[in-house]
Each structure stands twice: as structure tokens, then as C-alpha cells.
Image (tube, grey):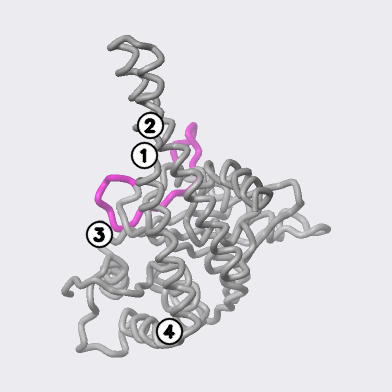
Amino acid sequence: MSTQPHPLSITNSVIFTSVFEDETIAKQFLELVFGVEIKKVEVIHTEHSIKEAPALRGVRFDVFVKDENETAYDVEMQAAKEEHLAKRIRFYESSLDSSELSEGKDFEELPDAYVIFICNFDPTGKGRMRTTIADYSVEDNEPYAIGRQAILLSSKGEGNEAPELKAFLEYVGGATPESDSADSFVNQVDAKVQMLALDPTVRRTAMLVEQEIAYRARIAGKKAREEGLEEGRAEGRVQGLAEGRAEGRAEGRAEGRAEGRAEATAQSVLSLIQTLGLDRDAALEALQIPLADRPGILKLIEQLDTES
């Protein structure tokens, strides 16, 4: 495979969820990941939102799938590195269980569940194409099966994976599929991506997400530099000492960067809400805001709503 920039790639959240709405593609992907034949899958929903109570944090799954045995799969595209990915996996696993155990059901009815993250980076720093996270008994020094697993697939790793899965992960990383096997999985995915890129509504929404992410990063950096320098100078002048000036600049820059990033992020989320009619959870997820940052961003959005 050769590597070329792709204007609208599978890593875009809008494109990814639209591609995996196709149950044939979802089924083939799961078969490649697990190396077994799956008779039937049902894509329950893409961008599937779960919130047990108004006061609790909700979760939005990219692609939520079930097979003929009622095994549940949450497939997530993670384009950008996230500092707290392990905690996010934990949250998604618990949310998946909660969604499957409705009132009146016994625990024995809880299906097996898998959370699969497709990462366009190395999530563990170990250079592996696949990392499997399973429950384990420390005292017995062996796995303790409770019916759940998390699988991290990396476009930046190496591993003894099925050729079609490797080709797909390389494609996630930006490689162009070979043209000699049009029926291969990665070529089917790419054909779907190309078709979606021609749909004006899908393309407009996908491009807006890309633009908002880029805008958020650009504005945050610019504002942080301006505010950080100004606050640093002001604090340094008040202290009047060389040491005070140096410390003031450093603290001012740090505070300015943090505040600038947060406000620019809130503006971007608000723009998606107003432009596309997304709810707040969907907008936060589309822009891949880390879970730890979301409460503060939501407060800023409320302030911006009040001011406007």
C-alpha cells in the first residue's frame, strides 16, 4: 500500500459511522477481528446514546452491533490520542452492561460484550497492532472470564493479524488500498467512503466536523499565546522583581493557554450544536473531547448561552 492524504477518511466520525451502518461491512469486520464466522449481525444503531438518568453522564457508542447469539459489540474509531483512554474503556464497558441488563432481567441473561477501539495511533506505546484487555485472577495467575473484553487495534503497530485486517488498519492510517482485489474488505470500505464523499449532506457534515476540530486547535493556540503573554507581563510588572516577572510570565502563559483552549473548545461545541442541531453529548463526541474535560466545557457552554 502507498500512503496518501485522504480528504475525507474513515477516521472521520461521520464517515466511520455511516460506513459501519452497512451490516455486511460490520459483519466482515468482526469476523476479521475474532477469526470466526458470524452467521448474522444487526447494527442496532450508530451514534447510539445511553443515559440511565438525567443526573448521570451519558455515553454515545459509535457503532453498536449484536450477533445471532446476542453478543454485544461496541466499535469505536479513535482518531486522536486520548490521555485517559483506559478509563474511557472502563466507562464504555460498564455502560454497555447497563444497557443490556434491563429491569427484571437476571444477571445470567447478561450477554458477552466486547468494546473495540480502532486507534490511529499506538495506544500502548508497545508497537503492537492488537492489544486485548481481559479480566484476570491475580491469585490464580489465569484469566477469569466474566464475559467482557476490550480490544485495541492500532494503525501504527505490527502483528500477526489476518492480511485483510492488516490492510484495513493500514488504510485507517492513511494508506491507499491496492486495486488488484476489488472484493477485499478494505476495498469495500474504501468504495463506501468514496460514495459517501459524493453525498452533499454527508460530506458537508463530515467536513464541518473536520473544520471544527482544526479551528478549535488553531484558535485555542492563538488565544492562549495572546492571553498568556498579556497576563504574564501584567503579573510580572506588579511584582516588580526579576524573579516575579519570570514566574508571572510562566504562570500567565499556562493559565492563558488553559483558558484559551477551554473557551475555544466550548465555542466549537456550541457551533456544532447550533449548525447541525446535535445534542451536547453528540457534539462533544464528534469533536473527541476527553471525558475529563467535558464538565468544564459544558459549564462554559452554559455561560456562552447566557451571554448570547
Q: Which residue is mark 1?
A: 226
> Within 10 angstroms of label 2, few (less than 14), some, or many (20 or more) residues?
some
| 10 Å crowding of disc 3: few (<14), some (14-19), many (20+) | few
Residue with the mark numbered 2? 230
Q: Are marks 1 and 3 in contact (CB under 8 Å)?
A: no
Tell me how far mark 2 sits from mark 3, CA to CA: 50 Å
**Residue with the mark numbered 4:** 196
Find residue 153 and report its image quarter: bottom left
Q: CA distance from mark 2 to mark 4?
A: 46 Å
Residue 190 in percent (x, y) is at: 34, 81
Q: Nearer the viewer, residue 164 or 136?
A: 164
State the separation of the CA atoms marked 4 and 1: 40 Å
Which numbered disc, 2 or 3, marks the residue that appears first in the sequence? 3
Q: Secondary structure at mark 3?
A: loop
Marking on residue 159: 3
Q: Magenta span covers which residues?
A: 124-142
> How far is disc 1 from disc 3 in space, using C-alphas?
45 Å
> How far apart are labels 1 and 2 at the CA level?
6 Å
Secondary element type, mark 4: helix
Q: Does the magenta run of residues contain 291?
A: no
- Answer yes or no: is residue 76 visible: yes
- Three-letter residue code for mark 1: Glu
Q: Position of residue 39 (x, y in %)?
A: 52, 81
- Position of 181 compared to 278: left or right? left
Q: Quadrant of residue 226?
A: top left
Q: Badges 1 and 2: C-beta atoms under 8 Å apart?
A: yes
Task: Please tell me whether residue 140 belongs to the stretch shown in magenta.
Answer: yes
Q: Locate the N terminus by quadrant.
A: bottom left
- Is 18 situated left or right of 191 in this image? right
Distance, label 3 to label 4, CA atoms, is: 31 Å
Task: Compare residues 57 and 166 and report the one nearer the observer.
Answer: 57
**Residue 27 visible in this rendered orientation of the protein:** no
